[in-house]
């Protein structure tokens, strides 16, 4: 039988794909460069493709490719459902990515995004009106639309719990630290503060004892869970100087807590030149850093060799009395979210860039983000685990 042109094209294409698939490493490398949505579609082609993208090794490859082009994931405003957008660093074009509204959440209250890691985001949701000082904790993968509600921890009384997220060294490992009080007080009348930790490897909470301090609420944040994870440790602000030096609480992956002081000024500055309530912890190139906003300028302090170093002092642009509602950073810039604008400070040029106005920033949250195929339970569903 004579082969038609269409049959010839199909045969040649099939042979070409067979050669690609036979080179397993090259085949997985090609797939790892696709978007997560394309990878999810590729799983439906055949059993071989589905098996290739379910392996732990492939998840590592895909995440490594995604990290080469980090993005910001943004929740510009709290609403009944959490609408997430992606932005490229240096670009202010919001691109809708996912709507997160998992079944089983407390629908009468808004979800707040508090951390992003390895393509997953951690969100908190007030439990109920009767438990206004406690939260549901969710792990979500916006790219795969998977969500996981963590088991409820012990009841927190008299104060909102503070949540912190740690992850690594393996991509499938993360820990959630939950600092809370059961309402008991010491002889001095202060609340006794405890901590429990959730591990992706066990899927359960475990008490790890008392904690020296309860983290403070961050400026204009509706919760106590503002934190940063740098160099294997979670850091929370505890207090500003009044009258003693301000404090930072930290915990490492081995669940050891410690306390460090905020930077101290060598002279007697004016009040507006001290640590202000507009103070933020950030990850600056892998180093713990502190951004302090003053009236007309800002400071960047970096923790180096067990001491604070003033890395930069630069002017603040005229923001027309707008409030800074959120602050985060990438490798090359600091991103400030005000009432209606986005402002980025570029380290190389030491200049600000403004975008907007926008009319929809309400309790915004933005974090660096890399798409991944990791499941919300930390990788237990991946083959090879």
Image (cartoon, helix red, strand yellow):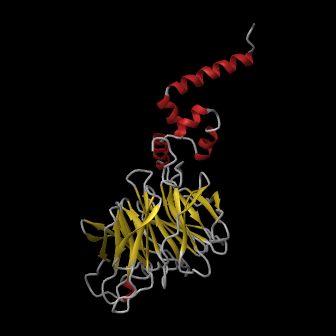
Q: x, y (%) of residue 61?
A: 46, 42
* Residue 351 position (above or below residue 265): above
Left or right position of 126 against 2: left
Q: How many numbered circles does the render carry?
A: 0
Residue at the (69%, 16%) spot, across then down: 8
Which of the pair 11/384 is nearer the observer? 384
Q: In this view, does 190 lie above or below 58?
A: below
Residue furthest out toward the bottom? 188
- Image-quadrant location for residue 18: top right
Q: Is residue 214 visible?
A: yes
Q: Where is residue 291 in the image (x, y as percent from the top left)?
A: 40, 72
Question: What residue lies at 63% left-to-right and 32% top-to-bottom?
Answer: 46
Q: Is residue 161 above or below residue 140?
A: below
User: Considering the image in quadrants, where does the N terminus appear?
Assistant: top right
Residue 245 is drawn in which quadrant? bottom left
- Farthest residue toward the top? 1
Q: Position of residue 298 (x, y in %)?
A: 41, 75
One can see residue 334 in this view: no
Nearest the eye: 292 or 2 = 2
Task: Identify the image quadrant of residue 274.
Answer: bottom left
Q: Say which of 237 and 352 sits in front.
A: 237
Q: Pick the quarter of the image with the C terminus.
A: top left
Image spot of residue 311 (x, y percent) = 32, 68
Task: Pick whichever, 302 or 270, lies toward us.
Answer: 302
């Amino acid at each position: 039988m004579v082969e038609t042109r269409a049959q010839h094209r199909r045969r040649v294409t099939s042979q070409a794909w067979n050669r690609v698939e036979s080179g397993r490493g090259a085949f997985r490398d090609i797939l790892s460069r696709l978007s997560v949505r394309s990878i999810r579609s590729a799983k439906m082609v055949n059993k071989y493709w589905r098996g290739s993208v379910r392996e732990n090794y492939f998840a590592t490859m895909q995440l490594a490719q995604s990290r080469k082009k980090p993005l910001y994931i943004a929740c510009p405003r709290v609403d009944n459902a959490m609408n997430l957008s992606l932005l490229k660093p240096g670009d202010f074009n919001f691109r809708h990515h996912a709507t997160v509204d998992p079944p089983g959440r407390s629908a009468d209250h808004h979800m707040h995004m508090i951390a992003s890691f390895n393509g997953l985001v951690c969100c908190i949701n007030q439990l109920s009106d009767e438990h206004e000082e406690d939260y549901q904790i969710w792990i979500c993968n916006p790219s795969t639309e998977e969500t996981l509600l963590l088991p409820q921890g012990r009841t927190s009384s008299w104060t909102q719990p503070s949540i912190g997220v740690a992850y690594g060294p393996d991509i499938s490992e993360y820990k959630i630290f939950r600092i809370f009080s059961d309402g008991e007080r010491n002889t001095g009348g202060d609340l006794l503060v405890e901590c429990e930790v959730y591990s992706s490897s066990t899927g359960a909470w475990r008490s790890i004892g008392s904690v020296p301090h309860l983290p403070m609420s961050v400026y204009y944040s509706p919760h106590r869970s503002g934190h940063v994870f740098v160099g294997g440790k979670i850091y929370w602000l505890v207090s500003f100087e009044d009258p003693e030096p301000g404090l930072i609480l930290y915990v490492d992956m081995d669940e050891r807590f410690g306390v460090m002081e905020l930077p101290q000024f060598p002279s007697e500055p004016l009040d507006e030149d001290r640590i202000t309530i507009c103070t933020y912890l950030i990850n600056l190139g892998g180093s713990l850093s502190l951004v302090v906003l003053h009236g007309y300028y800002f400071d960047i302090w970096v923790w180096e060799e067990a001491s604070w170093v003033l890395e930069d002092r630069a002017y603040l642009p005229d923001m027309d009395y707008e409030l800074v509602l959120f602050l985060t950073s990438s490798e090359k810039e600091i991103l400030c979210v005000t009432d209606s604008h986005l402002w980025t400070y570029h380290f190389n040029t030491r200049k600000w860039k403004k975008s907007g106005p926008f009319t929809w920033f309400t309790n915004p949250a933005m974090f660096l983000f890399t798409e991944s195929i990791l499941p919300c339970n930390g990788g237990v569903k991946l083959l090879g685990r």
